[in-house]
Image (spheres, grey):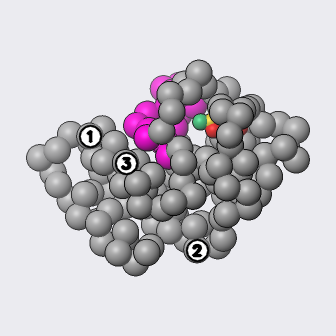
Amino acid sequence: MFKELRQEIKGMITKVNIPVDNRLQQICNLLKESIPYYDWVGFYFKNGDKDELKLGAYAGEPTDHAIIPFGKGICGQVALSDKNFVVPDVKAQDNYIACSINVKAEIVVPLFVNGENIGQIDIDSNTPDPFTTEDERFLEFVNQEVAKIL
Ligand code: SME
């Protein structure tokens, strides 16, 4: 599954005539539709000079959390740690921002441009403990591809 998706992502990234935001939207849609346990897929980016994240393209239910201060929730922690954050059970997290009562697990992978953490991809799952190191490697790949067009 991930092998084919890698090729599709590469194809989407190279469509230079499509605006970047639309390409990010296509990637969110592709991941949400192709991977059964990806129920919400979105990109957050550092909001200008502010120490906060702003929601960019996403696929899934709308969220109230379009702005997340650095340090808050799983996303805000990744903005500071520069590290992947895999959450098998969101109920076990103290510093967690709930977007939907259906969400059981989450993975957030930072996105680097020239070595700088400028955002992240965030996946919510309604399935408990679904993420493996394969998801981490795949989402790192997605972010490396996206970094090429930012
Ligand atoms: N759960 C995230 C907030 C973003 S929503 O999942 C879309 C967090 O704790 O940072």
Count of numbered circles in the view: 3
Residue that badge 1 annotates = 22
The answer to whether the residue labelled 2 contacts the one labelled 1, judged by CB atoms less than 8 Å apart, is: no
Q: Position of residue 47 (x, y in %)?
A: 51, 27
Secondary structure beneath disc 1? Answer: helix
Instruction: Identify which residue, 41 or 121, lies in the foreground.
Output: 41
Q: What residue does disc 3 label?
A: 29
In-front residue for pair 44/93:
93
**Residue 146 shows in this picture:** no
Specify whether 129 is left or right of 122. right
Look at the numbered disc 2 and say if its residue's Cβ is closer than 8 Å to ligand 1: no
User: Which segment did they paint magenta?
Assistant: 41-59
What residue do we see at 78% from left, 46% from top? 90
In the rendered image, residue 51 lying in the magenta stretch gets the answer yes
| Residue type at the position of mark 2 | Glu
| Residues at discs 1 and 3 in contact (Cβ within 8 Å) | no
Q: Residues within 10 Å of mark 1 (few under 14, many from 20)?
A: few
Q: Give the residue pinned by disc 2.
A: 134
Residue 81 point in image, percent of width and height: 72, 49
Left or right of 20 in this view: 144: right
Classed neighbour count for the residue bearing mark 2: other residues with Cα under 10 Å, few (<14), some (14–19), many (≥20): few
| First in residue order: circle 3 vs circle 2 | 3
**Disc 3 residue type (three-letter):** Asn
